Image: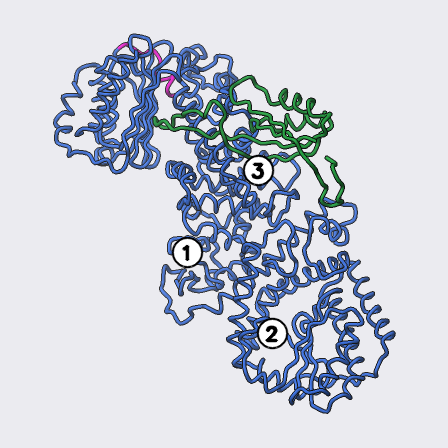
Amino acid sequence: MPTEPPAAAPVSTPTLKDALRQARDELIQSTKLARGGFAAVATYSERLDDLIRGIYATARTHTDTPHAIAAVGGYGRKHMCLHSDVDLLIVFDGSIGAPEERLLKSILHPLWDLRLDIGHHVRELAEVQTVETDNPEFLIAIRDARFIDGDAAVFDQFSDHCLRPGSPWEAPTLTALRDLVTQRHTQFSHTLYHLEPDIKDAPGALRDVSARHIIDGIAKPGRPAEFRAGRLAEAEDFMLRIRSVLHLERRRNLNVLSHELQESVAGIFGSPGDPPKRQVESLMSAYFHHARIIARSLAVSVKSLTSTSQTDPTPISDDLLRLGDEISFTDGTRASLRPRTWLGAFEAALDQNSAVSDQALTCIERHGERYPPEQFFPSSIERDQLLRVLHPRTGLYARLSEMHACGLLGRMFPEFQKVYCLVIRDFYHKYTVDEHTLRTISNVESLCTPKTRSRKRFSGLLDEVDRPELLVLALLFHDVGKWTNKNHSEEGVRMALGALRRIKLPETDIVTIEFLIRHHLQMSVTAFRRDTDDPTVVHRFAQVVGTEARLKLLCLLTLADVEAVGPDVMTPWKEELLWRLYVDTYNHLTLGYGDEVIDPNAASLVALLEERPDDIERPALERFLDGLPQRYLRSIDPARVFEHARLARNLGSTDVRCSLEQTGEVWELAVMSVDQPKLYSEICGVLSFYGMDILRGQAMSNAHGVAVDVFQFTDQDGFFRLNASGPDDFRYRLQDVVAGREDIDRTLRPKEQGLPRRRSNGVKLVVHVDNQYSDRFTILEIVTQDAWGLLYRISRVISRHDCDIDLVLVSTEGSRAIDVFHLTKAGAKLTDSDADALRATLETALEGPS
Amino acid sequence: MKMIKAIVRPNKVDDVKDALAKNGISGMTVTEVRGHGRQRGHSAVYLGSEYEVSLLPKMEIEVVVPNDLVDDAIEAIMQAARTGEIGDGRVFVIPVEQGRIIRTGEKNVV
């Protein structure tokens, strides 16, 4: 209920000017000390109240009609900055005639003379019986109506009509508010991240706070302030303090925190002694921190208007349930004591295409700080759950954003928290470092549903990547090193290694992520700033990358990273440059590697020789590696190189030595033997006989005639799993076949004849023969649908054409097999007619029945 | 005054910028463009399939210079952008009737 204000004495214009000047001086003094927040603007608002009361003391005599004067809008909220509009509502309990007009003029003219910007609404009480649905600004402005002077009973009647709980004005007000918020946010592209934000209108700025208060005032009248209310008040105060400075500096009601004004505001807010750039970065970091609090707070309130609390909960597990389209904790108290279960809420939300509820997020936010990072990953179960969560799919960005907003991401990985709201000031990074990071992941997510033909090329790469969650993990850490002024790639590696070892990620995965973080700028620098028409540039880049798998990951990371700098940064022009570098490098790695044998003086070889085990003598290792392609050392880790060298030791002409190891579902076979015709075909035949599905493989030989064949395959039919002696049977048969004691063609013939005709499944057969790319080899590239015995059939055709298979790279990506053979015939490249004949036979063999 | 429009390789922009700066020319407009000259692009192979790369990514640099600096500017651009290979680009010179600085209204100042 409004209280009757003390009767004010009439005041003259010079006195009014003095009073206003004094009020403004007070606010200016506070603003210059960075204290132009709540308290200062409220005091200034009250000074204006007094001013208006002084004017009204003279004007009130013009009419006997009961009336009330109220502040509305920002003035009603007491948020008056130096040049804010003074929004007034004058309500009459009776019709408006000449005396009432005189009253209005007597109030408004002195205010205009003071050069205040006045917005005024005049109503009769009878008018407010009808809801003004066509005037959304008025509906919203009166929610903050505050009595200033006049007849308090008239204001009470107005409030009773328009503002009481249950009033017919409420629903239209909420509708109008939501529409206006949407329109306003659309103007700002629905993001709070702007290089020059509008402190009043942008998402996460002052109007959003006001909207949130109005929604809660209507939806939850009399409800106690919630957990985040304190932080919201801090955020609002921060925004008001900035706005006060903007009004002081611009001398107008302009609220854009421009680059220029960021320096002025930072100078007032900042720490003395800090360089201006640092002060601005701190200011903008604080701005985005507070804007996020406001934006999230409003989002929660808006969501509450449409919540489906009537829906019955559906249990998901002991800890989780689904309510409407949200995942909640079954028991918040129990969940607060079991941080290892929190990640499960996000996984369930991703699985069910839902959001995580505010109940769960608030629980995590409240209790997260009690737990050190280790407690979120007590075992490999939680680590594997994290990897599942990070697998690119629809909703990943939204869930990670929730995880970050409630603090869980920063609790699990304090390394990531280091870049919370971190601003690097330049004129093209639109987002804070943490938001940039999450947007890189959003960009990977969007490749799951590519919108353009150009993007489908990159989307195809994502499909071909074995463990895309490692890409997401690398993106999560790729910029964490920006918290210092050091080389951020190296600092990022250092920080990521700590985090990844803490969650006990396998070392091979860590090596991949380490590579991606360390080189995350390399591909964009090469593509956009180097002459990629120069083969040397591509050659050097290929040497850094090493393998196609890493190339694909780095290409995707680069695309996602550059695109997340700002909305228009990854232009189609840059996309084309990136793709061209990818293709040139891919071709170099798959078609051109045969010409690059291991350099005896290469640093990598010297290091390998130094770290060799005692049982391998240096000359033996050097002899084994002599003439092998550089690719061998890039793709095979040292421990396996040493194992291969042991197998190749004193190899007899009919010896076949192999190692067979299992990692998870994948088996790796390494075969060492003296190189001979049909060898590769025979090994493939034996693998086919046992029903093994070859995923990847490479074959090569050294300068001393030792063939090195390495295959990764899965045991599709479970032969090894179901037969304890399976691996030994395999070895014996392989030795018999290579030694000529068994004809694998004859063994396989019945099985081949019994297979049904293959279907293409959308993979178009490509058989491409290139006699230009390599100086030493004819290169045969085959892309076709994967099928049983495919490699065996291809290599058998090649052998029947009397071609020698010098090098092989095979990979299977989904249902597509990509095989690259480096061939010679009688020690030289194939003639064009030989190449044509081989291609024709292969096309017939691969298009015909299997 | 003349406008010099140069189409150069993307990686040569910084070299051209530096070369112009040494000749006292600092203002410029740089645009990402795609096109082809007489070489009309080329074909590339990926996964065994050939495809045409008909429009190649290039950078377009526009500078407006006084008449007495035109030859020096062209020479600077050509030296900085040349590799000797096909695809180094083009330089065009176009007459400019008038120029204004929007902020001050100053006339014919480059």
Kindly report the distance in space between the C-alpha atoms of the residues bearing marks 1 and 2. Answer: 40 Å
Protein chain holding label 3 = A
Amino acid residing under circle 1? Ala
Regarding mark 1 in the picture, which secondary structure is present there?
helix
Regarding mark 2 in the picture, which secondary structure is present there?
helix
Is label 3 on the same chain as label 1?
yes
Q: Is residue A422 above or below residue A642?
A: below
Kindly report the distance in space between the C-alpha atoms of the residues bearing marks 3 and 2. Answer: 52 Å
Q: Quadrant of the N terminus of chain A?
A: bottom right
Mark 1 touching mark 2, by CB under 8 A? Answer: no
Question: Which one is closest to the eye, mark 1 or mark 2?
Answer: 2
Is label 1 on the same chain as label 2?
yes
- Residue A726 picture location, percent across and down: 22, 30
Query: Which label belongs to residue A138?
Result: 2
Q: Circle 3 sits on which residue? A: A492
- Residue A821 picture location, percent across and down: 32, 20
Quarter holding residue A49: bottom right
Describe residue A532's horizontal placement relative to residue B25 as left or right: left
Amino acid residing under circle 3? Gly
Point 54% across, 24% down: residue: A531
Chain letter for green? Answer: B
First in residue order: circle 3 vs circle 1: 1
* Residues shaded magenta: A643-653
- Residue A846 picture location, percent across and down: 22, 27
- Decide which of A706, A651 is in the foreground and name it: A706
Query: Which label belongs to residue A349?
Result: 1
